[in-house]
Amino acid sequence: MIALLWGFFRVLHNGIEIPKLRVASIEMRGFYLSLDKKLILRLDSLNLTPLLDSPASQESSDLSEILGWIKNTKLLLGYFQEIHLKEVILGENQGSLLFRGERYELSLPDLYASITLDEQKGHVLAQIQEILYKPYKARFIGKADYGVLKNHLTLEGMLSIDSAIHLNVRGESDFKRLHLEGESLPFDSLRFLKDVVEIENPNIRAWLYDNIHSPGMELASFSFDSELNEKAILESIEKRLKARLEIASPEVTFHPDLPPLHGRGVSVIYDERGVSFELYEPSFEGFSLEGSQVGLRDIWGEKPWLDLLIKTEAVLDERIHKVLKAYKIKLPLHQKDSTTLAKLKLEVDLNDYETEAIGYFETKKSNFSLNRLDFYAQEASVKLVNSLIEILPSRIKIGNFLDSELAFSIDTRQELIEGKAHILDFSIGDRGEILRIKGIEIPFSADYKSAEIPLRLPTLETRLVFGERLHRIQAQNLALLYPYSRLLQEESIRAGWVNLETKDFERFSLQASLQGLSYPLAERDGTPVESLEIEGQTSPSSTQISSLDGRLRLEILDKAKLFLRDYDIPLIEESNPKESESKKSETEITGENLHLIYKGKRILSNRLKATLKGKENISATLSYKNGTLKANLQNKRLKIEARHFNDEFVNTFFNKEIASGGRFDLIGEYGGGVFKGKSFIWDTTLKNLNTLQNVIALIDSIPSLLIFKAPGFSAEGYAIKQGEAEIGINDRYAVVERFLLHGTSIDSEGSGVIELESSQIEFQTRFKTLKSLGTIVSNIPLLGYIIMGEDGSLSTEVTLTGTLDKPIAQTNLAQDTLKAPLNILERLIKTPLRLFGE
């Protein structure tokens, strides 16, 4: 037996060489086994491919089982001085293995390892000269300490990947759990991870590898804990890995359509939530984003998203809108000055960039524009939820015409606006003359689908259209605006519609249909003018308005100028006239073919010109053909001078033909409720007067009065060469203090009273006749005086009573005839005295 063993050791010492050897399905070539101090095994080729098809190879082993197998292998290797497998074939993979003393060297197509092992007092110490994983160009150099008794492994060393990053790695394991931690030396890019970590989502890849640029990065720390099985380690990398990457002076691109963000630094934190970015002194296009946060969530899942919190205080201008537009957020508000405190949270689906957005914006004393609408925000708060923008109750001013507290919402998808306005002051026109609304709440709506923004006020049936250069106000029912318009109230415009156009809400052009008017204007048939179609312009310094038919024009500059044509104008006495806002304001009225209507009487005019300074200082000139009337009202006293008016003017005034031909004058003054004046007539025939006709009828009925029948005093009329009357009129009576008419054949004079309310009259009139006979006789000295008397005529008195419509005439001509001989005798006796004097 000893000899047999000696022979076996002798053979091993000399070496056993077998060119080709097969053990089961494993094939070996160039087999050489010898014995020195320990066994030496060399193989030119070892083909392990058949093992891939064995059932055992299909079973997965956890890492602890693999480590146990390695420990058992270590015990087996204790019998070998050297093992050199020049070629190991495993399927399509080939490699080599060298074990020599304490040194292990493994070479595979993708992996190379060189390790030296040393056992000291229950510890196996490993010096790792190099472990190289070729696909990732990852190289590890370090050491390990395995405590046999405690079954505990510690590890530390340097891991380099493509020479782009160098990691200090420390780890420990009890072969049940594994803990790794470490940090890196500075590096400049994360692109090396492209070949290490496979990420399918292109947007995630861009974020990790392309969106961050920096002159220097450093992995400040990383760590993870895992159970010792392959699946648990992979899950730990995704869920339990914690890492903190410090990036100096970064440029971070949030979106491919946006310029990069800059900052002093960024801390990139990877943990179970995903990737978070802590920004230090970040800025975007010149404004600070301090306090903003960025996060990548569920980066290994099917629906990764970008969690973005933007905080800034900046002007809400194109820079902010560029960010919102990139994430498909429409915010139609543009800020022109001041700043807005903005807080915007975005959740961006990194598959399709669909965005969920929640934002808050606050500002004070800022000018904004909503498309073409400019407004001023004393203070404003805005809430944004995806496509819905809610303006919380905010103090808003639009131009110099609207001050309100608005609360409204903007649907950016439908491009619609709806809300309510508590009107503090809504003023259009100089000092709100056109429209002034205060202290009410008005619902409104609008859309901004086009360049113009139509703002609708349904309760007022009004539409405001804000355009690029021109704005329009369209009020369809002026009755709803009447309570808020001093202009409508002063002009008694209670119905109709108006369209205003303006560029600056100070100067307006207008078109309007005014209904339900109560102006002192009427058509020729007496129909009141209750509607007008007008157009014009108005500004703080001037106003020009005209009717579409050209019959009315109004111009207001330093004074008001009103032109009227072809109207009837009723003259109305105001018992308690309201004073105008300025007693010194001046109005000039010019008229053509106007008829003035006073207490049912028509006053004709071809031309009228009047100047009003308040309601107690009026001067006017009216002309009709050759006639002119001048009137002046001052200090509550009205002076009138009318001259050269014809019979047409007079007949029209009395609404009947009372005169034929002639000229008529009137001079007088009205004050204290009383008019006093004188009237004059020339060369006319008075006709169709009830009083005159009653006198003629009286003459016809009494034969003794036929002496008064004359061509100039008959049923055809009373021919007057010249006449005058002194009259006085108050609210109860018209008094003719004296009238004197010189007719062609009969003169008359007298006085009387008319009670205006009842038309009762009482007149005493003296008629004188036989003027032609008196003229002949008077040419005979003394005879004319003796027969005809002092005035050379025969006279009688007529008393008129009754009413103007039904006068009663009475005369005493018969009594005067009986007294005639006595009168002749009296004048005969007085003749010597007349001849020689008393």
Image (cartoon, rainbow, N blue to C red):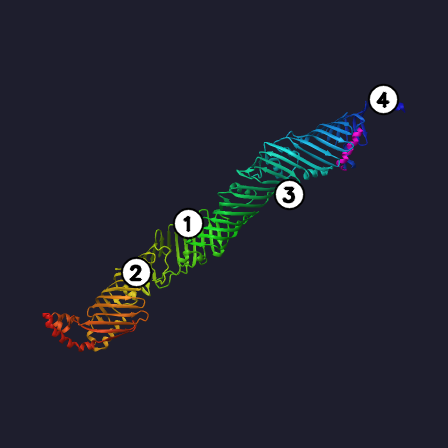
Front label number (1 vs 3): 1
Estimate how packed mark 2 is, as few (under 14), some (14 to 19) or many (20 or more) residues with alpha carbons within 10 Å. Answer: some
Between disc 1 and disc 2, the foreground one is 2
Specify whether 48 is left or right of 496.
Answer: right
- Would you call the spot at circle 4 few (<14 residues within 10 Å), some (14-19), or many (20 or more)? few
- Sequence order check, earlier mark of 1 and 3: 3
Disc nearer the start of the sequence (3/2): 3
Q: CA distance from mark 4 to mark 2?
A: 161 Å
Residue type pointed to by label 2: Arg
Whole-percent x and y of residue 390?
A: 54, 49
Could you tell me residue 415's position as x and y percent?
Answer: 53, 49
Q: Label 4's element?
A: helix
Give, as a single range, the part of the protein colored magenta.
59-76
The residue lying furthest to the right in this view is 1
Within-10-Å neighbours for mark 1: few <14, some 14–19, many 20+: some
Q: Disc 4 designates what residue?
A: 10
Task: Choose between 106 and 242: the one closer to the eye.
Answer: 242
93 within the magenta span = no
Q: Amino acid at mark 4?
A: Arg
Amino acid at dot 3:
Lys
Residue 637, numbered circle = 2
Q: Earlier in the sequence, mark 1 or mark 4?
A: 4
State the CA–CA distance, disc 1 to disc 2: 41 Å
- N-terminal-most mark, 4 or 3: 4
Q: Quadrant of residue 512?
A: bottom left
Residue to which mark 1 is pinned:
506
Front residue of 395 and 133: 395
Please give the residue where the numbered disc 3 appears in the rendered image.
Answer: 303
Q: Residue at x 90, y 25 (%)?
A: 1
